[in-house]
Image: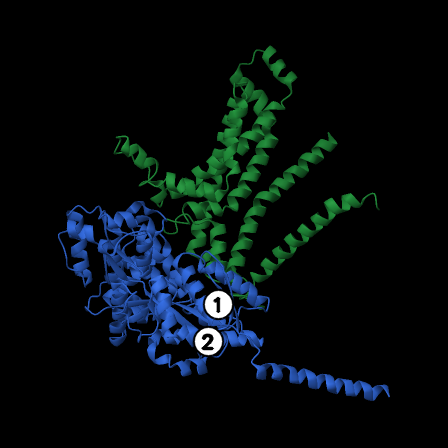
Amino acid sequence: MPITTTRRRLLAGSAAALALPAFARAQGAVKPRLTAISQWSAGSDGAAITALGKKFEEKGGVWQHSPVPGFTTEMMNKLRAQIIAGDPPACSQLKGPEIAAWSKIAPTVDLDALVAAAGYEKVVAPDLAKLHRPAGKWIALPLQIYSTNMLFLSKRAMDKAKADKVPVTWAEFNDLAEKMKSGGVAYPIANGGTRPDDGQKFEAALAGISPAVYRTAIMNLDEKALKAPEIKAAFAQVRKIADWMDPNVGAQHFSTNLKRFVDGDMGMMIMGGWAQGVLRNAGFKFEDFMIAPGPSDNGKPVFLLNADAFIFWQRKEADLQAGQTLMAQLVMDPAIQTMYSQITGSIPVRTDVDLSGEGWSDGQRRTAAALKDAIASNQAVLSLAHNMAQENGMTAAMIDVITEYVKNKTIKPEQAATRLAEAVESAR
Amino acid sequence: MIRRLPEILTIWVPLLLSAAHLIAFTLWTIWISFTPSTLVPVTGWVGLRNYSSVAASRNWQIAFDNLLLFGSAFVLLSLATGLILAILLDQRIRGENVLRSIFLYPLAVSFVVTGTVWSWLLNPGLGIQKLVHDLGWTSFRFDWLIDRDMAIWTIVIAAIWQSSGFAMALFLAGLRSVDADLIKAAQIDGAGPVRMYRRVILPTLWPITITVIVIQLQFAISTFDLVRALTNGGPGIATQLPALVVYDLMFQRSLLGRGAAAAVLMLLILLAVLLPYAAWRYLQRRRAIHA
């Protein structure tokens, strides 16, 4: 009879269909595969992620990384397109509060079990950890850390100023800048003219004056804190810094000035730890400059955190899921973090990695020590200029005020403070 | 039907496709501008909220003022430069072909390249000002690029350099097509060269002038790559232009709804230029038919 045949066929068919994946799983035939996108295509960033891919392949995985060169926003445009098309990468670069924002538009992978197995939570700075489990569950993993407020000192400019002491507070910093100026250093501050450059000067100033106000005003957007006198003081410090900069930089990148900085034509640079890699790549020696934590008025280091991370997007394919597990394990592995940071010049996310050995620079050791101290004294805060403290829209609104203030010397510090509070209100 | 196939394939299919594209995406952008979309497009209705917040933002106000200044200065100056170049070239001089190519050549360079090159030339620490200082005139100042009030003029300079050759080419074609009898008649009547240009030749250039103005204006309104490469909206936010604001809102700040609203506002500005032009063309054609 036709009906029974059909039914029998159907049964046989469905049994086979059910058995097949189970069989495959039992055989361990799934080869981990990872589709990943990031903006890291060239230089030390490209080299580092390629090295990570090699490790992934050594563990038997298939590494499918598609870099989107350019700004982070370009990478985000590709991510957006893939998510809308229903085909997100298994893993993508994303950082800061954007992790929370983006996790609302597509399902992410729950990494809690993997994080617990690796004991990762204990070795990550608390504020940083929070960003990677926005709704309570880990969905993203930080990979490397930079501080955005490292102080780079030109040895030759120090010689001109007849100074050898690294400034600890803003007052000492200002003294040194004056000494450099009278010692013949044309511009005591080396700086680029981009928006993050200007933003970094402000965040370094405010966090150095009061990490507590930085936390309440910039990270928590507390209305009262935004009107605190410390904000005005920070803008006043930024004005001093701006007056010591070369006004001719226009919208150039900070790296344009590195030679003049090393030559002692410019004295100090407040920049992220990545500048060490850029200086080294440009052929300058460790003897040419010094690195120290940025000025802090209470004498204890303040660490403005900037951390790159990977977020994991839900996929149904068994091989991609296996790839996500492998990738997560690799990213949390201290050996991998060591390899990665040694290539890029950052420091590992794990606070338990020993940096005393070969392959680490003094600057990296000092950065890692600063992070440890800052966490201990609750002075590790999230960078505004590098999109760690707020979502992109809010960040941009605040940086608008800061960058205009740096370039327009007729704006008074109190006016800037009012405008900052207004910008926050209208961007909420 | 078969005989008309090439015509259908070469004209109608591409035309329909691009028209559908244009209209569909324009409508879609208009729709998005009324939704609360941020990271990705979502449905919902917020009325004019995106428009009011864009119009109230400092960035947009600066961009709009800059557009008025940049648009009018750029169009008038490139028109004048183009016309003068065309009249000078029209004097049957030697090497006209070479000069014409030189003046037209900047048009072959992309705006990003123009912007980058001029950003170095205009940088006071590296470019023209430094050259003059090195030559010995140390009090010379030309630092518009880093001067908030003057920076918008650097964009005008670079844009004129880029596109006055285009205006020149159109004007030259116009000058060459003036009826020779008309010129001869004027000569017989004893008109000198200045009078000849003012009274006889230039009035025939009106249609070309209008065309050049409209083309340059729509370029001015949609300027993006030039200013991005030259000043990137700086110093601070002093040289913002509407297209920069749209890009910034959509892709830097992930505020699709507001970005779309700014894009629609840009479209309205464009229409304010193009609709009168279309009306003018229509009237002219009617007059030509009735005459």
Vertical arrangement, residue A35 with respect to residue A278, above or below? below
Comparing A276 with A354, the one in front is A354
The residue under the point 23% across, 68% down is: A301
Q: How would you rate the neighbour count of disc 1 (Cα within 10 Å): few for under 14, some for 14-19, many for 20 or more?
A: many
Q: Is residue A423 left or right of residue A33?
A: left
Distance in Å between CA atoms under marks 2 and 1 = 11 Å
> Can you see residue A172?
yes
Comparing B6 with A214, the one in front is B6
The residue under the point 36% across, 74% down is: A334
Chain of the residue on which disc 1 is drawn: A
Q: How would you rate the neighbour count of disc 2 (Cα within 10 Å): few for under 14, some for 14-19, many for 20 or more?
A: many
Residue B144's tag is none
2 or 1: tag closer to the N-terminus: 1
The residue under the point 48% across, 77% down is: A325
> Can you see residue A306?
no
The residue under the point 23% across, 53% down is: A288
Vertical arrangement, residue B191 with respect to residue B201, above or below? above
Chain of the residue on which disc 2 is drawn: A
Q: Which chain is blue?
A: A
What quarter of the picture does the N terminus of chain A occupy? bottom right
Q: Colour of chain B?
A: green
The quadrant holding residue A150 is: bottom left
Q: Which residue is mark 1?
A: A92
Comparing B251 with B109, the one in front is B109
Vertical arrangement, residue B164 with respect to residue A338, above or below? above
Residue A139's tag is 2
* SS at circle 1: strand
